[in-house]
Image (tube, rainbow, N blue to C red):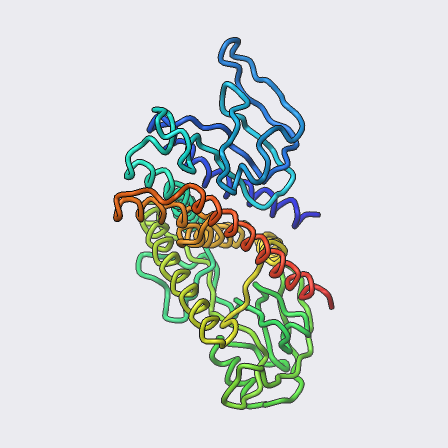
Amino acid sequence: MFTIIIFLLILSLLVIVHEAGHFFMARKFGMKVYEFGLGFPPRMFGLYKDPKTGYLVSVRGPGKGGLKETVGGDERIEEYPNTLWSFNWLPLGGFVKIKGESGEKAHEADSFAHKPAWQRLVVLVAGVFMNFVLAAVLLSVGFMIGLPTDVTGGVPEGAALKEPPAVVVQQVVDDSPAKAAGLHLGDKIISLNGEAVENAQALTEKVRERGAVEITLIVKRGDEELTLKVTPALLSEDTDLVPRLGILLADAGIVRYPWYRAIYQGFVAAFFGLINIFIAFFILIKNLILGRGLAFDVSGPVGIASIIGQSARLGFNYLINVTAMISLSLAAINILPIPALDGGRALFVVIEKIFRRKVSMKYEQLAHTIGFVLLLLLIIVVTYKDILGLIP
């Protein structure tokens, strides 16, 4: 229950910040916003401000704007005299429905389609920008209080160690000996067969020396110390025939900066974090095209919720770090030129500008509908894989 609550709170924060970018830029450019929704239809309930009385009015039930009108590009029926703030049954994200965003009512001044291309592009990328800013702010706050940082190459200039470095598990490979033994993200490895572990490199060398022989690890998880037995084995992607545990390790210490340096460092870390995510997407897509499979694990809502829960138990600074990375991932995914996403909608605006003619509304709506359905199917497949991974 704790994990579910934390996950929903963080998901709501990320969605609200993202959609707020679209909302405020649309309003700034004089566009009418029909609805600001948390989750996807069917609708549970909603609120809007009556322009005549100034009072909030509550509405219940699905209304006239269903899932197809929300994400498929179909023209939305104007139901209410002001923006409806809605809460919906499918908790997979959120949306802002802007008048004319699919090309309809282009002759009306408050329509998205009526505005110049540069204003439409600004509105479309505003959500991605806000996710980046949120990540940068979270990392800035994190660096003020102390964030887990890889200090293998030494403590960064201008920083101070709040806690001494420890050998920390950064990733656990599925179907690996470490996964079977119960190692988790964030575990601190204290000793191997009774010998103190100095650093990540030393631990890796000790495992390689012993080969496929059972070893005993003392692991610290929060305030608890655990004894785990694990036998290294060959992993499916190994080419050097060396038995492994199936974990990614780092010499991680809690690093903090003075507040004025922390702000700068937070934005720098967010920028390079976003670049690394784009590189990871490129490698992922390239390997899929070449038929090499996944280069690394991809998590859906269940997997992300599990990671958030583990991070929250490790401490607030770990939770901040993970939330910032998820926000950057959402920014990177949304800017990709995939129909139904912000990048896909921006692509149609760019095509219109280049060829000086609009893409047929019929084909654009069809592209966004297909894109959304495929994204939902991908989420279902990845979620199914995540659930299987949770079953012992």
Judge whether 3 appears above or below 186 on screen. above
Give the side of residue 376 with respect to residue 252, left or right: right
Picture quadrant of residue 306: bottom right
Picture quadrant of residue 212: bottom right
Judge whether 84 appears above or below 192 on screen. above
**How far from the left and from the top, in percent, is residue 248?**
52, 72
Q: Quadrant of the C terminus?
A: bottom right
* Res. 146 in view: no
Residue at image position (40%, 36%) is: 103
Residues 310 and 70: in front is 70
Give the side of residue 104 with respect to residue 59, left or right: left
Judge whether 238 appears above or below 42 on screen. below
**How far from the left and from the top, in percent, is residue 246?**
57, 77
**How far from the left and from the top, in percent, is residue 253?**
46, 63
* Res. 350 in view: yes
**How far from the left and from the top, in percent, is residue 33?**
45, 28
Give the side of residue 388 with respect to residue 382, left or right: right
In this view, the residue farthest toward the top is: 53
Give the side of residue 358 with respect to residue 102, left or right: left
Residue at image position (34%, 50%) is: 267
Residue at image position (46%, 73%) is: 287
